[in-house]
Image: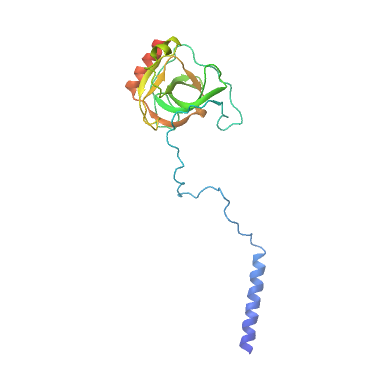
Amino acid sequence: MGDTNAGGTGKHWRDLVRDAVRQFLPPRSNPRPGSHPRPGSQQPPGSQQPPRAESSTATTRPPAPGGPGVSPYPGDFTGTPELHWSPRADGAPDPGEVVWAWVPYEEDHKVGKDRPVLLVGRDGPWLLALPLTSKDHARDLEQERSAGRRWCDVGSGAWDRRGRPSEARVDRIVRLSPASIRREGAVLEKSVFDRVAAAVRAAR
């Protein structure tokens, strides 16, 4: 009987101590949904997007990345820029690379579409780019020339997931903010870039 009472008293004191300690400990919380994974954990498959097919849908200008608004489009570049091939594996867009960006239409800079472009140079804070298309303008060459549009073949590359040959428009040079460019493309071979650059100079 004495042993039983002693055991019960000991358990009673242990319970009192445990309850007292719990009063001073913060409550446990579960990880919030969407919290950052721990270092070394893997991202879910498919988190990186494959190269896009060229969009045929016009859209109004999207918000600039990292900001609530957009900077007014400064207009297309006129004159002959300094064209140079200088791609670098530094995570930033450089001349000589094909990337994706929102490109405004000539007739209305508030409207445009997402498409691949060839970066060919710089103008202050802006990158200079030539719009690319997968349409074969050899079929309507005279019509395009009469409209003042000039094209140069650049071949196919990783910027088009269907592997279609592309053409660069060499009579129009658009200005793009580096922050608006997504590096979903490829580096153009220097020999091809030089051929495009010669076509740009001939069209000015």
* Residue at the (61%, 82%) spot, across then down: 7
Q: Position of residue 44 (x, y in %)?
A: 46, 46
Whether residue 6 is situated above or below residue 45 in the rendered picture: below
The quadrant the C terminus occupies is: top left
User: Which residue appears at 35% of the width and 18% of the height?
Assistant: 194
Please state, as top left, top right, bottom left or bottom right, where the N terminus lies in the image: bottom right
Of all residues shown, which one is farthest toward the bottom?
A: 1
- Which residue is farthest left? 191
Q: In this rendering, does residue 2 appear at all?
A: yes
Task: Indicate the position of residue 184 as horizontal and vertical percent values.
Answer: 43, 32
x, y (%) of residue 169?
42, 18
State whether residue 117 is above or below residue 44: above
Give the camera-side residue of 53 and 2: 53
Q: Residue at coordinates 36% horizontally, 20% vertically from top-left?
A: 153
Query: 35 or 51, which lies in front?
Result: 51
| 6 lies above or below 64 | below
Q: How many marks?
A: 0
Foreground residue among 64 and 23: 64
Residue 146 location, quadrant = top left
Examine the rendering and report whether any part of residue 177 can be seen.
no
Quadrant of res 17:
bottom right
Q: Position of residue 129 (x, y in %)?
A: 45, 21
Colouring used for the render: rainbow
Name which residue lies at 65% across and 77% down: 12
